[in-house]
Amino acid sequence: MDLTTEAIRLGMNMAQLRAEVASANIANVDVAGYRAQRADFGQAIGLLREAATDPAMATDRLMELTPTALRDSVSAADSSADASASLDNQVAELESAGVDFQSLTTILSRRFALMQLAMAGRN
Amino acid sequence: MSVDSILAATRFGLEYERLRLEAASHNIAVANTPTAPGRPAQLMRAVAPQAATFDAAIGGLERHGHPALIATDVAQREVHDPSDPAADKNGIVSYPRVDMVTEMSTLVEAGRAYEANVRAFNTLRSMTLHSLDIGSGS
């Protein structure tokens, strides 16, 4: 697939993972001693930033970052300052991940509609 | 500036107001608890980091600091009650001096501000989702 579609796919995977992490934190919010999980998107954001500046970038590099590879970046917070998960914060995180996901799916379906138009010649 | 960062600013507001609410509840709860003799009376206060302006929250993609609860020393209210086990050798029991009017108004104010932040979050969210309908023809 082309670079934009791959970038959108990666963004959707990131939004999905954020929602999953927030759900896990909400489920365990009342467990004593629970350390909130955090996803680290450093690598993914770096790749997306590179894709935004360099249109000739190989799509394979974006495809290497599979959902499984992204999930490996999830870890429990180690500093005691933000180890506790607060319910409102996690619900807000879940909501903004949902908004992200919905935006990206809409954009992707618009792109596919354009491709379909190009193939069929009419809408 | 992205939509996400406006949502982040609103979430910062939510966290700060929740901490103010916690601090006020804590202060009301300890108002009649004697402090240990020789120790300063302490009350909780919510503080926001220095650079936590709305512009900083909107403009900076980097994570800015979080609001936090800190304990501050306050004046004491001293009551003569030798029968209390927490009394010192002169029979004086000290309590933190809690201004109930301030604490109660903080409680109500923080609750209202929290609601306002939730409303702002929901409005922003539905605006974002509505913007996806631009040009979809229906």
Image (tube, coloured by chain):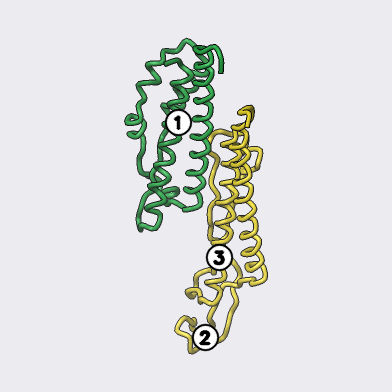
Query: Badge 2 local density, few (<14 within 10 Å), some, or many (20+)?
Result: some
User: At label 2, which amino acid type do we have?
Assistant: Gly
Residue at (41, 35) in percent of width and height: A40
The verdict on a common chain for dots 1 and 3 is no
Residue at (51, 43) in percent of width and height: A95
User: At label 3, which amino acid type do we have?
Assistant: Leu
Disc marking residue B43: 3
Give the letter of the green chain.
A
**Which residue of the protein is positioned furthest toward the top in this rendering?**
A56
Query: Badge 1 local density, few (<14 within 10 Å), some, or many (20+)?
Result: many
The residue indicated by pointer 2 is B91
Chain B colour as displayed: yellow
Kindly state the secondary structure of the residue where label 2 is placed. Answer: loop
Quarter of the image with the C terminus of chain A is top right
User: At label 1, which amino acid type do we have?
Assistant: Met
Chain of the residue where label 2 is placed in the rendered structure: B
Kindly state the secondary structure of the residue where label 1 is placed. Answer: helix
- Residue B18 is situated, as x and y percent measured from the top left of the image, at 56, 56
Chain of the residue where label 1 is placed in the rendered structure: A
